[in-house]
Image: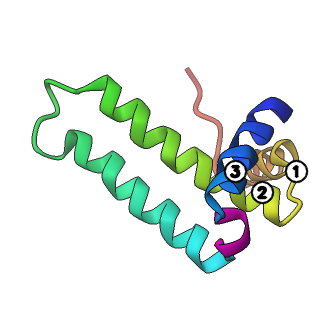
Amino acid sequence: MDKVFELIQEMRRSRGWDNSDTLPILIKSVSVEAAELLETIQWDEENIDMRAVESELADVLMYALSICIDYDMDVETIIRNKINNVYERYPEVKK
């Protein structure tokens, strides 16, 4: 994961985005890119362009990880906390 963070930061630094990105900008960008991910299936759920899905998913992840980078959030910790919250809120499905 550290290498991924380094790649994201290198890209952001080379474009000056590390200096201009704010939390509101990053949060809005996650939303915009998530909408673009949705567009990959909006009109045709049968013939999905997986390359487009991957590209838009990468955008969503890079913006979300940029928030973690800029605000010193540990990705594993926040995901584990969320999973624990889900276990507390939703009953297990018996199979």
**Residue of label 1:** 74
Q: Which element type, helix, strand or loop, lies under badge 2? A: helix
Q: Main secondary structure of the magenta part?
A: helix
Residue 2 visible in the displayed image: yes
What residue sits 60% from the left and 79% below the top? Answer: 24
Q: Which element type, helix, strand or loop, lies under badge 1? A: loop
Image vertical order of residue 92 relative to residue 21, above or below? above
**Residue of label 3:** 65
Residue range (magenta):
17-21
Say whether residue 48 is left or right of residue 86: left
**Residue of label 2:** 68
Image vertical order of residue 83 relative to residue 85, above or below? above
Q: Which quarter shows the N terminus?
A: top right
Dots 3, 2 in contact, CB < 8 A: yes
* Mark 2: amino acid: Cys
Position in image of residue 22 (x %, y %) = 67, 76
Position in image of residue 53 (x %, y %) = 36, 34
Dots 2, 1 in contact, CB < 8 A: yes
In primary-sequence order, the first of circles 1 and 3 is: 3
In primary-sequence order, the first of circles 2 and 1 is: 2
Mark 1 or 3, closer to the camera: 3
Question: In the figure, residue 21 lies in which quadrant?
Answer: bottom right
